Image: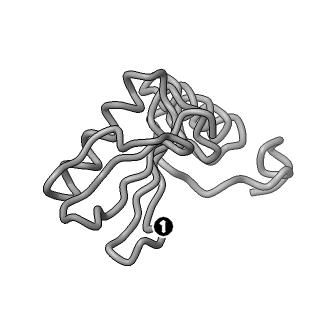
Amino acid sequence: MPNSRHVLPDPDGGWRIEKPDADRASAKTDTQAAAIARAREIVHNDGGGEVVIHGVDGKIRAKDTIAPGNDPYPPARLSVDAVGVANRQAGSALHRRGWLSRAGERRRPRSHLQAHGLSS
């Protein structure tokens, strides 16, 4: 990824934030939490990208895409309006099919014959 930072344990103690192919660390902190927060800030200020978090053993523990980066699996987001429209559309479809009364109460669907007055 073009803009990324790695949060790694520092051999001298603490944690360091490195950009791939850089000669020196972008920052050093005492705690991993502070290093993660600083790495997110750096990536965000640089136009978005990915923060790769390594554990104490040096293995990758987690990855975090920072906006406006390109998350390959973004969380689904529906606006309140979209949810309301979907619910209204579903309700009207149920009403047309005879599953809802005009008052919005659920009712048993009528058969085709009952709907046309051909059966009791």
Q: Residue furthest bottom?
A: 57
Q: Residue furthest left?
A: 30
| Image coords of residue 37 (percent x, y) | 25, 43
In percent of the image, x 19 and y 61: which residue is there? 14
Q: What quarter of the picture does the N terminus occupy?
A: top right
Figure check: 31 above or below 75? below
Q: What quarter of the picture does the C terminus occupy?
A: bottom right
Q: Amino acid at mark 1?
A: Ile
Figure check: 43 above or below 7? above
Q: Say left or right for 113 vs 38.
A: right
Q: Say left or right for 98 vs 101.
A: right
Figure check: 9 above or below 109? below
15 vs 78, nearest the viewer: 15
Residues packed near mark 1 inside 10 Å, few (<14), some (14 to 19) or many (20 plus): some
In percent of the image, x 61 and y 57: which residue is there? 108
In percent of the image, x 37 and y 54: which residue is there? 7
120 vs 74, nearest the viewer: 74
Q: Secondary structure at mark 1?
A: strand
In percent of the image, x 36 and y 44: which residue is there? 25
Q: Which residue matches tag 1?
A: 60
| Image coords of residue 118 (percent x, y) | 86, 49
Q: How many marks?
A: 1
33 vs 21, nearest the viewer: 21
| Image coords of residue 95 (percent x, y) | 62, 37
| Image coords of residue 56 (percent x, y) | 32, 74
